Structure formats: structure tokens, C-alpha cells
Amino acid sequence: MANASAKKASAARSAAASTYRPLVVGINIVHFLIRLYQYHISGSTTLTTTSLAIHVLLLVLTGIAYRGILDDYAASATSTSKITGSGSSSSNSSCSNSNSSKNKLAGGASLDLLGLIVVIQYGSALFSDTFYWLLGILPLWG
């Protein structure tokens, strides 16, 4: 039984990796190319320490989010506990919403973190460096 759940977790992790790896790599490559183009246009030959530290931090956070997404997919594949209603009566109007909560998107807070990182990366690259201030909400992140 434990072997079967390990196989399910491995299969789910592999499926999630095949879905999210190209996405994460593509997001980071395009961001890098945008930044490279901006440095070329501005004529700047040096990268400030602060800018470099923020780019490294964003890459590390992207890796953490990616690992968290894979872990959440593996955990959701092996999870056997389903959301159950408090009663068997079908007259409860909230029972129609319980079906949609069973089909929630795997990835959880890590997927939200990846979305925030993408907003910070592209917002700071295309609009203003003030998007880096969004990193300040990470300690409040669930």
C-alpha cells in the first residue's frame, strides 16, 4: 500500500515537473533577455550589487516555488482524505459547492508565490523598479 502511494506521488511529481519546468524556465529566460536588452540599450556595463542581489533572490524564490508546487502535487496525489460534509442531507445548499472544492488546483501557496514572482519580475523589467517593493509582502505570505 505504501509502495502504491509512493508510485502515485512519483507519477504526480513527474507530471507536474513536465508541465511546470518549461514554464518556469521560459519565464526566467524571457525575463533575462528583457533585462539584457535593457542593459544594452542603457549602455550600462556594470550591474549594481543591489540589482544583482534582487535577481538572485527572485531566482531562488522561483526555485522554492517550483519545488513547493511539485511537493504539493505529490501530496495531493497520495492524499486519501477527502472533504466530507457534516451531514448526508442533500437539502443543504452548500453541498453544490463541495464538488468544486474537491477539484482545487494543486500547487497551493507555492503557485501563488510563483505568480507573485512573475509579477515582480516583469513589472520591474517593463514598468518600474518599484515593483521590487512587492517582495515586502513575502513575510506575510501564508
Image (spheres, rainbow, N blue to C red):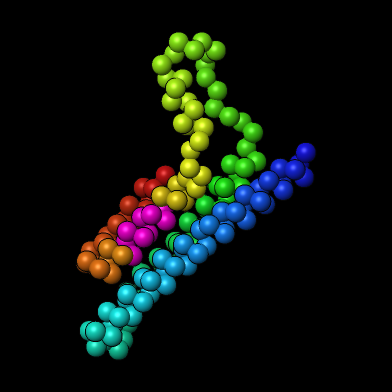
* Residue 123 is one of the magenta-drawn residues: no
Query: In the figure, 39 relative to 101: above or below?
Result: below
**Residue at the spot x=71%, y=47% of the render?**
6
Q: Nearer the viewer, residue 102 or 6?
A: 102
Q: Position of residue 34 (x, y in %)?
A: 32, 75
* Residue 117 is one of the magenta-drawn residues: yes
Q: Is residue 123 found left or right of 17 in the rendered image? A: left
Q: Main secondary structure of the magenta part?
A: helix
Q: Position of residue 122 (x, y in %)?
A: 31, 65
How many badges with numbers are in the image? Answer: 0
**Residue at the spot x=56%, y=54% of the render?**
16
Q: Position of residue 74 (x, y in %)?
A: 61, 47
The range drawn in magenta is 113-121
Query: In the figure, 76 relative to 68: above or below?
Result: above
Please state, as top left, top right, bottom left or bottom right, where the C terminus lies in the image: top left
Query: In the figure, 95 relative to 117: above or below?
Result: above
**Residue at the spot x=33%, y=52% of the render?**
137
Q: Nearer the viewer, residue 82 or 99?
A: 99
Q: Is residue 13 found left or right of 28 in the rendered image? A: right
Q: Position of residue 72 (x, y in %)?
A: 55, 47
**Residue at the spot x=47%, y=31% of the render?**
101
Please state, as top left, top right, bottom left or bottom right, where the N terminus lies in the image: top right
